[in-house]
Image (tube, helix red, strand yellow):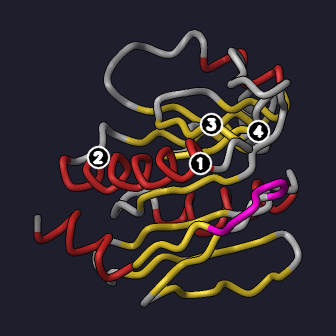
Amino acid sequence: MPTFERRWTAADLARMPEDGNRYEVIDGELFVTPAPSYRHQEAALVLHGILRNYLRRERVGHALVAPADVEFSPKRLVQPDVFVVPLVDGRRPEHFHDVNRLLLAAEVLSPGTARADRVAKRTLFRDQGVPEYWIVDLDSRVIERSTPADPRVEIAVDRLVWLPEGAGGALEIDVEKYFAEVLDG
């Protein structure tokens, strides 16, 4: 007896229940993530604040937090915890389809998201040419950095430097200070 595997699309997600879960589809596979923990949200919001302050000086992009759909194709719709879209004519875009690309995507690792974040999403963001992909690992107090140009993962323990296209100066994140603010508050 043949087995049939359902191939999910972005359109299918519009019919999902409003139940507090996050629904994403990557290459036809459905990923369901429960509502994030307080610690997870704190990590995402602190990172968003750092990026937002930097992008106020370096007007190259606009930082957002989930939930917000990023649809690369009918089979690729994700909701990164924190992401940066490029500006359009010097202004923040109103819809993702206005830009169709990201300057940065970041995920805060949770016990139930490790496979999706480290494998499926890392592959997706590389395939889509996202210049930077970060995974914030709260337990290890490190930030994993990936780029499409290098299949290896860089582990940032002390500092993380980001210089997006068009910026005049780099953002330098003191990783130890970031984790102290998020976890030791």
* Residues drawn in magenta: 165-170
Q: Is residue 138 left or right of residue 37?
A: right
Foreground label between 2 and 1? 1
Taking the image as shown, residue 167 lies to the left or right of residue 69, namely right
Mark 1 = which residue?
57
Which badge, 1 or 4, is on the more N-terminal residue?
1
Residue occupying the point 44% across, 68% down? 136
Label of residue 86 in the image: 4
Lateral position of residue 51 relative to residue 125, left or right: left
Q: Where does the image place residue 6, in percent across and percent down from the top left?
A: 71, 33
Cα gap from disc 2 to disc 1, whole angstroms: 25 Å
Question: Which secondary structure class fits the magenta region best?
Answer: loop
Residue at the image position 76 percent from the left and 38 percent from the top: 86
| Residue labelled with disc 2 | 41
Nearer the viewer's eye, disc 4 or disc 2? Answer: 4
**Residue assigned mark 3:** 62
In space, the residues marked 4 and 2 are separated at their CA atoms by: 23 Å
Of 12 and 157, nearer the camera is: 157
C-alpha distance separating marks 1 and 4: 14 Å
Work out whether mark 4 precedes mark 3 in sequence or the reverse, and give the earlier one.
3
On the image, the x and y values in percent for residue 179 come to 28, 73
C-alpha gap between disc 3 and disc 2: 19 Å
Q: Does residue 37 show up magenta in the picture?
A: no
Say which quadrant the N terminus sits in. top right
